[in-house]
Amino acid sequence: MRRSTQAITSDDQQTPLSPDALTELVTHALEDLKGINLVSLDVRALSNVMDYLVICSGTSNRHVKSLADNVTQKAKAAGHRPLGVEGEDAGEWVLVDLGDVVVHVMLPATRDFYDLERFWSTPPVDESAEVLSEEILEGDDATPSRS
């Protein structure tokens, strides 16, 4: 079950902010402050807690903090309150949890070390296919050889 992403309208009615619209808002907020190597990953097939993962680098701790703060401010201005923000103190890696969209803003060295793009781009393992492969391989060993 995915977490709810809601925006509050002026008449206090809640209207959902689509994950695509939220991802676009995040992208513009990061581009506004010259975020580096912006990547947006559709992780719906890999995760049931978020739809998109947005990763961006900043040139310094201050730049990383500013990028994350801009995302937070733009989301709030659109009526969408972040569920959480982590890492603002150090500024090497700041995570902004917007529900259906999670944003990681990092220093380049931190980003290279954790390599989230590779981690979240790996397709899920189909366990039934693995079992079938093992059975086939075991079956080959059990097949009598013709001499």
Image: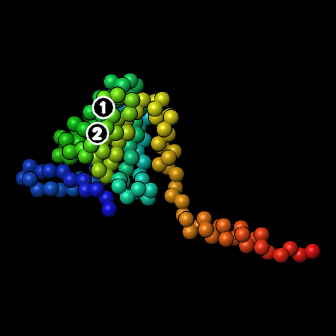
Q: Pointer 2: residues within 10 angstroms few (<14), some, or many (20+)?
A: some
Residue 93 visible to an observer of this rendering: yes
Q: Residue at x 35, y 42 (%)?
A: 103
Q: Are marks 2 and 1 in contact (CB under 8 Å)?
A: yes
Quadrant showing the C terminus: bottom right
Q: Nearer the viewer, residue 22 or 94?
A: 94
How far from the left and from the top, in percent, is residue 95? 34, 39
For the view shown, which residue lies furthest in the right direction? 147
Q: Give the residue type at disc 1.
A: Glu
How far from the left and from the top, in percent, is residue 45? 44, 59
Label 2, label 1: how many angstroms apart (C-alpha)?
7 Å
Q: Is residue 144 left or right of residue 8?
A: right
Read off the residue under disc 2: 85
Read off the residue under disc 1: 88
For the view shown, which residue lies furthest in the left direction? 11
Q: Is residue 126 left or right of residue 101?
A: right
How far from the left and from the top, in percent, is residue 57? 41, 32
Q: Residue at x 25, y 46 (%)?
A: 83
Q: Residue at x 31, y 41 (%)?
A: 96
Q: Is residue 35 above or below residue 120?
A: above
Residue 28 visible to an observer of this rendering: no
Q: Secondary structure at mark 2?
A: strand
How far from the left and from the top, in percent, is residue 82? 24, 44
Q: Secondary structure at mark 1?
A: loop
Q: Is residue 76 left or right of residue 90?
A: left
